Image: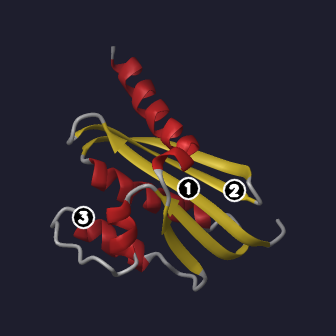
Amino acid sequence: MNEVELLEIFTDGGARGNPGPAGIGVVFRVKGTTIASFKEYIGETTNNQAEYKAVLLALKHLKDFHYKAVNFYLDSLLVVNQVNGIYKVKNEELRPLYQQIKDNLFFENVKFQYIPREKNQEADRLVNQAIDEHLKNQS
């Protein structure tokens, strides 16, 4: 696989109810083209925990790609500001997820940026698919 200059990763997590049934979605793009996507149902959790778990899912798959720089795009201002060190992680349930992200940032050229929800539609769609598929299989 060739090394790409910039890998763009769009992540999203959501719960129906807070907490509630939750899913995560991840989209990898190069020059605007989706090259991989991942979704997962993660059980009953909160929206913020789901947002963190989406980043962790992306990091898990990142080792399969070759890149010079990585930009993460999230529609969770809280997670972006916590990972960037602007906000402290005060919530006890989020702290271990935050630490896992920090422990798995094994590369230098990485940025976390906030984007409005409407610019994260593909990852959001994956979140809803993961939840819908799980709920459908339960009935």
Disc on the earlier residue, 2 or 3: 2
Label 2: element kind = strand
- Asked if the residues shown at circle 2 and circle 1 are in contact, with their CB atoms under 8 angstroms apart, the answer is yes
Q: CA distance from mark 2 to mark 1?
A: 8 Å
Mark 3 residue type: Leu
- Residue 62 location (% of width, % of height): 60, 65
Label 1: element kind = strand
Residue indicated by mark 2: 29
Query: Is residue 63 positioned above or below 87 on the image?
Result: above
Residue indicated by mark 1: 10
At x 29%, y 54%, the residue is 48
Disc on the earlier residue, 3 or 1: 1
Q: Which image quarter: residue 121?
A: top right
Q: Quadrant of the C terminus?
A: top left
The reply, left or right, for residue 38 in relation to residue 88 is: right
Instruction: Please tell me how crowded label 1 is: few (under 14), some (14-19), or many (20+) other residues with Cα within 10 Å.
Output: many
Mark 2 residue type: Arg
Residue indicated by mark 3: 94
At x 44%, y 55%, the residue is 75
At x 45%, y 25%, the residue is 133
Q: CA distance from mark 2 to mark 3?
A: 27 Å
| Direction bottom: furthest residue | 108
At x 32%, y 64%, the residue is 78
Instruction: Please tell me how crowded label 3 is: few (under 14), some (14-19), or many (20+) other residues with Cα within 10 Å.
Output: some
Q: Which label lies toward us, 3 or 1?
A: 1
Query: Is residue 62 positioned above or below 57 on the image?
Result: below
Q: CA distance from mark 3 to mark 1?
A: 20 Å
- Residue 90 location (% of width, % of height): 17, 72
Disc on the earlier residue, 2 or 1: 1
Mark 1 residue type: Phe
